[in-house]
Amino acid sequence: MRIGVYWRSFRGLGGAPRVAANMIDSLGKLGHEPVVLTNEYDVKLYPTLEGRRILCTKKGILRGHPAGKVFDAVNAAFFLTKQIRDLDGLFLTGMYFASAPMKMVADTKIILYVHAPVCIDWTLNPTIRKILKKLESRLYRSADFVLSNSRLTQNTLREHLRLDSEVLYPPVDTKFFAYNDAKEAAVVSICRLHPKKRSELMIELFQNLKGDYRFFLAGAIEEKFTEYGKRLTEAASKDRRISVLFNPSDQEIKDLYAKASVFWYIYPKEEFGLPVAEAMSCGTPVVALQGGGVNEIVANNRTGFLVSTREELLRKTDFLLSDPETRREMGLAARKRTEENFSCNVFLKRVQLVVSRVFGRSSPHSDSVEA
């Protein structure tokens, strides 16, 4: 079957496009013909797209313009509605509301893979969120099947939109993010660097941690936040133990995970937190502020620690850095948990089941999926 996967941009670095790229790869492994639909892409950043059929809006994204998001949304909706007739099915990993107009022109099966409803987007005005909540509640129901990236998202859809869904955790490439036991005295945090995420707090936190340790803060940052990036660099320069890395490559991210003794995560509102699972795959224990999707990834006191205060975060970090045996035990448990719950093979099997349920038939290569 010809099944499309839509994500708005395969040019920037981040968890969402990596998940969409893995969905494309999974559909190909199952014997389907995956079609990439997007506003923009870079095959060098996402080699999974190479050789695939790619349909692009070929219209520039209005970066930094106040009307940019609205223009992109309308443009993408028209684009998807035009392409839908040539597809047997479509996974929407963004632009969820577009399922309604598409269903008006074609009977193509549409599957929503929801990372977060737009109505809870903390970057939007509260009044706009209220309006979007009413719209989303109606428009999402036009889809044939709804997936959530975590139980948190599942509960949010049920609470805000009265919509049922099934959980499909984002995948981790456990072969690429391999287990590594040769750790350094280093703490690592990888996340999207955004002013509203206040990543500078981690720099301030680490400065309160005494000892000959290193701290590496890394993540994707948009051009419009250049000044924020400068502020992070300036804050880090006050402590020679701290380094900041902007827009790291996959290999650089892997190397940071691999050498870290502890991974930090302080974003309790995130719906999942893919970097947490990737760090665990490399055998790195996690110390995180509890709340959000991270509660579903980290097994407290077994693969790391879920804490409620910054003071506790520093204490647990210091404990792990000074206790190599506990750190190794937690690292092994973290690796095992990732393989059993968040690996690409687990993701592939779940995608196979979803496709079978939605289309009423097995995938051509379903027998080749590992048990």
Image (tube, rainbow, N blue to C red):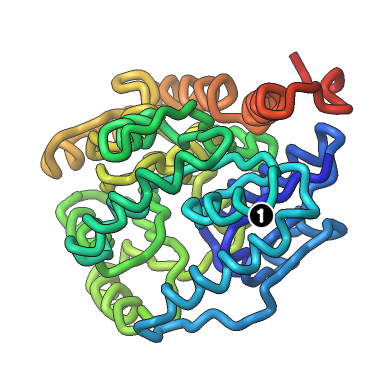
The residue most toward the top is 371
Q: Does residue 321 appear anywhere in the picture?
A: no
Q: Residue at x 69, y 78 (%)?
A: 58
Estimate the x, y position of residue 345 in percent, counting from the top left. 69, 27
Question: In terms of image quadrants, where is residue 300?
Answer: top left
- Height in image: 130 above or below 74? above
How many numbered callouts?
A: 1
Label 1 element class: helix
Question: In terms of image quadrants, where is residue 304?
Answer: top left
**Horizontal side, residue 321 vs residue 62: left or right:** left
Q: Within 10 Å of the Cα at label 1, are there few (<14), some (14-19), or many (20+) other Cα atoms?
A: few
Quadrant where the N terminus is found in the figure: top right
Question: In terms of image quadrants, where is residue 46?
Answer: bottom right
Q: Does residue 19 appear anywhere in the picture?
A: yes
**Horizontal side, residue 240 vs residue 18: left or right:** left
Estimate the x, y position of residue 170 in percent, counting from the top left. 54, 38
Quadrant where the C terminus is found in the figure: top right
Q: Front-most of 347 and 302?
A: 347
Q: Front-most of 39 and 347?
A: 39
Q: Front-most of 292 and 86?
A: 86
Can you identify the residue that label 1 sits on?
105
Estimate the x, y position of residue 42 in percent, counting from the top left. 70, 70
The residue most toward the front is 104
Q: Residue at x 77, y 19 (%)?
A: 370
Residue type beneath disc 1:
Val
